[in-house]
Image: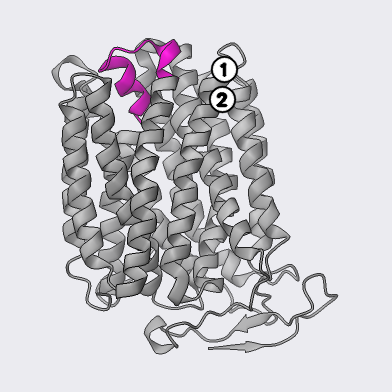
């Protein structure tokens, strides 16, 4: 339920009046295709997908390729432990700020809208962190720079995700989410290829190039979005409200809880592989670190080929049939199969087969996952806050996986990636089973 009213103050946006969200309305109580935002210009969806691509490229490349490569060159003997520390600290930062920024974004009264200031400001802050990463060459500086990058692009990412509930009707949401997911997969390929192509003696470029791409593309959406403008003050923000930013009652919102748990476990499975992918290639497949980035880039290409095909296919199937749960369950189990193949791989070729299976499974999963999460949100009125809690389900693994990985990798004398991959299989299976108790979505 929303009323269309003109924004207060000088008009800097489109001539069309901006919407204002009223009292919180349960998702089930509104029309299936209703969104609180105003109709968007024709270029909005391409800009939305490009912004998703840009933020994913920046975050995924820096965390999955640039930082691991820098740490391998810094100290090969301690690279695994150092990466776990960097990832865990970054995970704490993103876990704290995303729901909080989502709630503050919902309350924003800027004449530029609720989401646009966060997208633009986040990109600026993130580029500051990129500059620190590019100029530093120690573990402490890497932790500082990555934390600032997470802070900045975390704000941008929160705002972009909130647009799924703000601006995109349910009838096309799975397809738009699938297109965004495809762009995210392509972003990882492009980012890995960029880092592999950059010279080994120009460390700063490993961070600056992906950071600039992410900043530019996410900022472009700022100028193509007809944002929601809040024209009335939000209720005073109490301490209890801040604490509730990180919590939704799992008994009252049972379906939301199970969808959240599903995403948490599936993401833990994938993060267990993606964070340590470069080191698996170096230590388990015996590829020299000078050449490992190229193999990593090829693995991401294979992953994304399977991912794109299945994302497009199952996004269409899901929207046509209205079914989400069976796709989530089957894709999670298939991901476990692919991880099993990767564990037993005697060479690069078999390993790539396993990665292809995992990529295909993840493609099917992400084609419906985002649509599923938006359909179990408690309300549209606090979509930013609620989607911030959703974001915790794929950001918390950045903290939990490194903590779990340290003792697993130490088993049997160290660098035990087989134990880590077995844990990833368990996470995938449990994630698939978690979708079964959801009742409001088929």
- Residue 62 in view: no
Q: Is residue 66 above or below residue 372?
A: above
| 10 Å crowding of disc 1: few (<14), some (14-19), many (20+) | some
- What residue span does the magenta drawing correspond to? 275-293
Residue at x-position 22% and y-position 52%: 332
Res. 40 image quadrant: bottom right
Residue at x-position 58% and y-position 25%: 206
- The numbered dot on residue 137 is 1
Q: Is residue 194 above or below residue 336?
A: above
Tell which of 318 and 112 is nearer to you: 318
Residue 123 magenta: no
Tell which of 85 and 14 is nearer to you: 14
Residue at x-position 58% and y-position 79%: 235
Tell which of 422 and 192 is nearer to you: 192
- The numbered dot on residue 141 is 2
Q: x and y percent of residue 24 in the render?
A: 48, 83
Q: How many marks?
A: 2
Q: Main secondary structure of the magenta part?
A: helix
Residue 407 as seen in the image, left or right of residue 20:
left
The Cα atoms of the two marked residues, 2 and 1, are separated by 7 Å
Report the quarter where the C terminus lies. Answer: bottom left
- Residue 166 in view: yes
Res. 133 image quadrant: top right
Provide the secondary structure element on which disc 1 rests. Answer: loop
Q: Is residue 355 above or below residue 120?
A: above
Q: x and y percent of residue 158 in the render?
A: 53, 57
């Amino acid at each position: 339920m929303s009323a269309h009213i003109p924004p207060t103050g000088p008009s800097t946006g489109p001539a069309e009046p901006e919407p204002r969200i009223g009292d919180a309305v349960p998702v089930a109580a509104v029309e299936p295709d209703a969104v609180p935002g105003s109709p968007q210009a024709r270029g909005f969806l391409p800009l939305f997908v490009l912004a998703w691509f840009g933020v994913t490229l920046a975050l995924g490349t820096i965390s999955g390729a640039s930082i691991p490569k820098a740490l391998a060159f810094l100290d090969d003997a301690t690279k695994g432990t150092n990466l776990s520390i960097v990832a865990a600290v970054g995970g704490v930062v993103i876990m704290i700020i995303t729901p909080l920024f989502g709630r503050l974004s919902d309350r924003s009264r800027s004449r530029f809208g609720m989401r646009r200031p966060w997208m633009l400001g986040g990109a600026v802050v993130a580029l500051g962190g990129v500059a620190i990463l590019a100029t530093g060459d120690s573990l402490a500086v890497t932790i500082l720079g990555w934390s600032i990058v997470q802070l900045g692009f975390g704000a941008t990412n929160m705002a972009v995700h909130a647009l799924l509930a703000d601006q995109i009707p349910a009838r096309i949401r799975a397809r738009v989410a699938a297109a965004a997911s495809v762009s995210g997969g392509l972003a990882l390929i492009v980012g890995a290829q960029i880092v592999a192509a950059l010279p080994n003696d120009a460390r700063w470029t490993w961070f600056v190039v992906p950071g600039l791409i992410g900043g530019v593309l996410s900022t472009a959406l700022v100028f193509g979005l007809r944002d929601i403008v809040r024209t009335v003050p939000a209720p005073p923000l109490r301490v209890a409200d801040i604490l509730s930013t990180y919590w939704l009652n799992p008994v009252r919102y049972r379906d939301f809880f199970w969808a959240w748990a599903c995403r948490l476990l599936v993401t833990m499975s994938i993060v267990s592989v993606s964070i340590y992918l470069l080191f698996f290639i170096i230590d388990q497949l015996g590829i020299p670190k000078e050449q490992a980035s190229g193999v990593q880039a090829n693995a991401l290409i294979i992953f994304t080929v399977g991912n794109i095909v299945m994302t497009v296919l199952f996004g269409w199937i899901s929207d046509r049939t209205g079914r989400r749960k069976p796709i989530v369950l089957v894709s999670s189990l298939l991901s476990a199969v692919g991880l099993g193949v990767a564990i037993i791989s005697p060479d690069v070729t078999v390993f790539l087969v396993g990665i292809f299976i995992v990529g295909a499974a993840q493609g099917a999963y992400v084609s419906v996952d985002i649509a599923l999460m938006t359909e179990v949100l408690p309300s549209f009125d606090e979509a930013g806050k609620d989607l911030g809690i959703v974001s915790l389900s794929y950001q918390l693994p950045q903290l939990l996986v490194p903590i779990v990985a340290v003792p697993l990798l130490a088993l049997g004398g160290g660098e035990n990636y087989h134990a880590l991959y077995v844990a990833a299989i368990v996470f995938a299976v449990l994630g698939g089973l978690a979708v079964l108790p959801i009742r409001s979505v088929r």
